[in-house]
């Protein structure tokens, strides 16, 4: 025989949790209230729940000094061929950018995961070609900040 699971009482759960731990107030996703969870903006309408990272993309482009770049329509612009090593200051920025993109592609922006994988292969020894590919990918995000999963 199958045992019936009692209906989940969220108010009871949150009160017990708050009695034991110092917790923030609970938040509820509604059509009128979106939630930001670690850079992922959750929202909903009558039919769907949406996960978007537009605010995160904007912050990433600001960190990379690319807020005013010209958008492109594809995440990949060709082979990574230029093996010229990057200077140390640009290598650090490269690693920051690849890390930012890593968070995007491992959460919501699956459309850029292959491009990220190609670029991230150069983390140990960043090259001019990998940098150029990263810049192109940033331009792609500039043109597609509102792509989401729903």
Image (tube, rainbow, N blue to C red):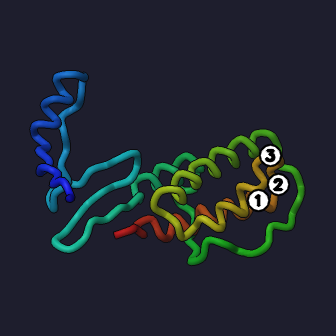
* Neighbours of disc 3 within 10 Å: few (<14), some (14-19), many (20+): few
Earlier sequence position, callout 3 versus callout 1: 3
Q: Are marks 2 and 3 in contact (CB under 8 Å)?
A: no
Seen at 58% across and 55% down, the residue is: 101
Position of residue 49 in the picture relative to residue 118 (left or right): left
Q: Are marks 2 and 1 in contact (CB under 8 Å)?
A: yes
* Image position, residue 19 (x, y; %): 16, 23
- Mark 3–mark 1 Cα distance, whole angstroms, equals 11 Å
Seen at 71% across and 55% down, the residue is: 120
Residue 41 lies, with reference to residue 91, above or below; the image says below
Q: In front: 61, or 46?
A: 46
In the rendered image, which residue does mark 3 sit on?
124
Q: In front: 16, or 74?
A: 16
Name, please, the residue furthest toward the bottom.
73
Q: Secondary structure at mark 1?
A: helix
In the rendered image, which residue does mark 1 sit on?
130
Q: Quadrant of the C terminus?
A: bottom left
- Mark 2–mark 1 Cα distance, whole angstroms, equals 5 Å
* Neighbours of disc 2 within 10 Å: few (<14), some (14-19), many (20+): many
């Amino acid at each position: 025989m199958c045992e019936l699971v009692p209906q989940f009482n969220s108010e009871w759960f949150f009160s017990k949790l708050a009695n034991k731990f110092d917790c923030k107030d609970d938040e509820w996703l509604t059509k009128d209230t979106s939630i930001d969870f670690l850079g992922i903006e959750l929202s909903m309408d009558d039919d769907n729940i949406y996960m978007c990272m537009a605010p995160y993309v904007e912050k990433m482009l600001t960190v990379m000094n690319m807020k005013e770049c010209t958008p492109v329509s594809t995440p990949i612009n060709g082979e990574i061929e230029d093996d010229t090593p990057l200077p140390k200051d640009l290598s650090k920025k490269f690693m920051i950018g690849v890390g930012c993109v890593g968070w995007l592609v491992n959460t919501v922006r699956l459309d850029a995961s292959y491009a990220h994988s190609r670029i991230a292969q150069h983390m140990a020894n960043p090259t001019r070609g990998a940098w150029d590919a990263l810049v192109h990918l940033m331009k792609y995000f500039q043109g597609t900040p509102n792509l989401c999963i729903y």
